Amino acid sequence: MFNSLKGLVVTLVSTMHGLRAPVTRQYPSTGNLLKRHDEPTPVKDRFMGFPALTWDETVGEPYCTSCMVCIRGCPTQCMSAVMKDNPLFIEEKSTRRKIVDTFEINLNRCILCGICVEVCNFDAIVMTHEHEMSTYNRNGDRVDLSALLEIGQKHQKATDWIPPTKRVKAVTGGDTGTGPAAAEAESK
Amino acid sequence: MAQVSKTTNRNGEPIEMLLNMGPQHPSTHGVFRMVLWVDGEKIVDVEPHIGYLHRGSEKLCEGEQYNQVITLFDRMDYIANFNNEQIYCRAVEKLMGLEVSERSEYIRVILCELNRIASHMLFIATMGLDAGAMTPSMFCFRGRERIQGLFEAVSGARMMHNYFRFGGLKEDVPDDFVPQVRELLELVKADTDESDKLLSFNEIFLARLKGIAVMTAEDAIDYGLTGPCLRASGVDYDVRKAAPYSVYDRLDFDVPIGLDGDCWDRYYLRVQEIYQSIRIVEQALDQLPEGSVESSLGRRLLRPPAGEVYVRAENPRGEIGVYLISDGSDKPYRVKVRPPSFCNLSALKHMLKDCWIADCVVILGALDIVLGEVDR
Ligand code: SF4
Ligand code: SF4
């Protein structure tokens, strides 16, 4: 009996705690029951959402060359890609001899493992922070090249994305080797 | 099934009473079905049915490259993902004779112990729910959420991390990792204290759990129980102590032992283990060396030499073993897992015998099975 009362007191104390600083959050907006902000749920920097393709601003084409490395590395075989000759290479505007023609990821099958990003040698694919992509039809999450690039570009803008290979160079090249140097490398 | 029930029909002939529990019963922690032979309110016999969550993980491993298999191990015991990744990585490292850098080992231990805490917190939460206490589960889930927030900051995913690599890690931890973990430990300690205060010595909770499904030390050993379920029966056996792997031999911690081997001991032992894990993480943080976490393998396709290895480790649920056979190709020839939940589940029949139906739920809960691992 006494013990149960003690438990009741503990619960009450915790309830008061909870009322003062709630830990739960209203989904999908942030804030709490009384104060609501209409921002998306925050995620951490390294958060691995759905993969998407990146866009090379300097040339104006995707980074992806359809080399198929990620496709072979994917544990669920959820991607496919087709390669074509790069028209910009013929005009000597780009250094990429081949470029992606079509690219499709079936996000329903993707297990968000990040292996594709790890194996890509061309910085062409990123794990975005996109994670709310439910659809009502079965193949609604088969995402094609243009949609992938769109998601990727959104991510690039939102996070000031620097290609990983350039990041490594900036770190090993300079003594300071952190953010500013890497950002400089990107702007060049 | 032989004659089991004393219940008789109008003509005085004994009738067999069957009660089906699951597979969608909320207390079965997944999809697990039990067929209970009952005599009134007493359980006479039980037949567990597993396989509802069978995904053929072991077979799938044979079709994936070595680095892809890590993602499958993540999904085996989906509450202790880091522990599962570690055991598989250790298997491949042993097969190849790979050295793991000090820093990676320490970070692995820190993450694994945090995962153990998260797993035990989930256990406390569900144990409370099984016994009818709603509030502690909220506290525990809050604590678990904090740990998962750290996991997200480190590995990018809350549960399916795919963060450990053979001979190292995917990338180094964030710069503010150490202060972040220290801060987290304080919070986790407070959370554990809170739910411990609320639940452990609660009269009703004690009445539901004390003296239920007692396993003697001999029985526990005979049934092959491992982990907290074995230690609750008073057997001092922890793989981290018995066959230290990784850097556990450099860390000072106690292995809590139960006295009676009943459900409450199984519960309280896990509460104690949380405090021990916090101790381990604190020490590991103090000793965390600088250095690289890069694997020496690089990115090339892995082809370990032909051979076979068996490694074991202490998972939150008990001893996990991985038996890996390689034929020299880029895919494992065979991966066999000794899952702790599955082996612990084998004692269910013994435990449930002559118990009340109402206790069935807490007995199953105290075993702390994860169906993803039982069925694989
Ligand atoms: S994303 Fe990278 S690895 Fe995949 S096809 Fe494109 S360039 Fe190759
Ligand atoms: S994240 Fe993993 S599953 Fe998803 S596309 Fe990349 S490699 Fe495939």
Image (spheres, coloured by chain):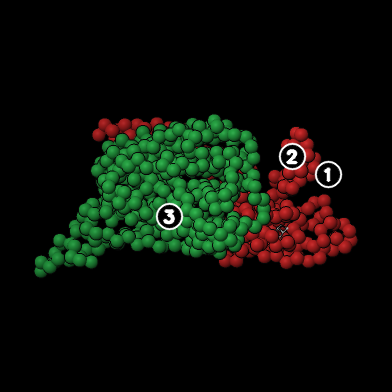
Chain colours: A red, B green
Q: Is residue A78 visible?
A: yes
- Mark 1 lies on residue: A188
Label 1, label 2: how far apart the Cα atoms are = 15 Å
How packed is label 1: few (under 14 Cα within 10 Å), some, or many (20 or more)?
Answer: few
Q: How many marks?
A: 3
| Type of the residue with mark 2 | Val
The residue lying at 31 percent from left, 52 percent from top is B223
| Label 1 element class | loop
Q: Is residue A2 above or below residue B299?
A: above
SS type, badge 2: helix
Query: Which residue is located at x 54 percent, y 50 percent?
Result: B94
Question: Which residue is at a point 35% across and 31% down the rendered structure image?
Answer: A9
- Which residue is identified by label 3? B338
Q: Disc 3 vs disc 1: which is toward the camera?
A: 3
What chain is tagged by disc 3?
B
Location of residue A105 (image quadrant): bottom right
First along the sequence among labels 1 and 2? 2
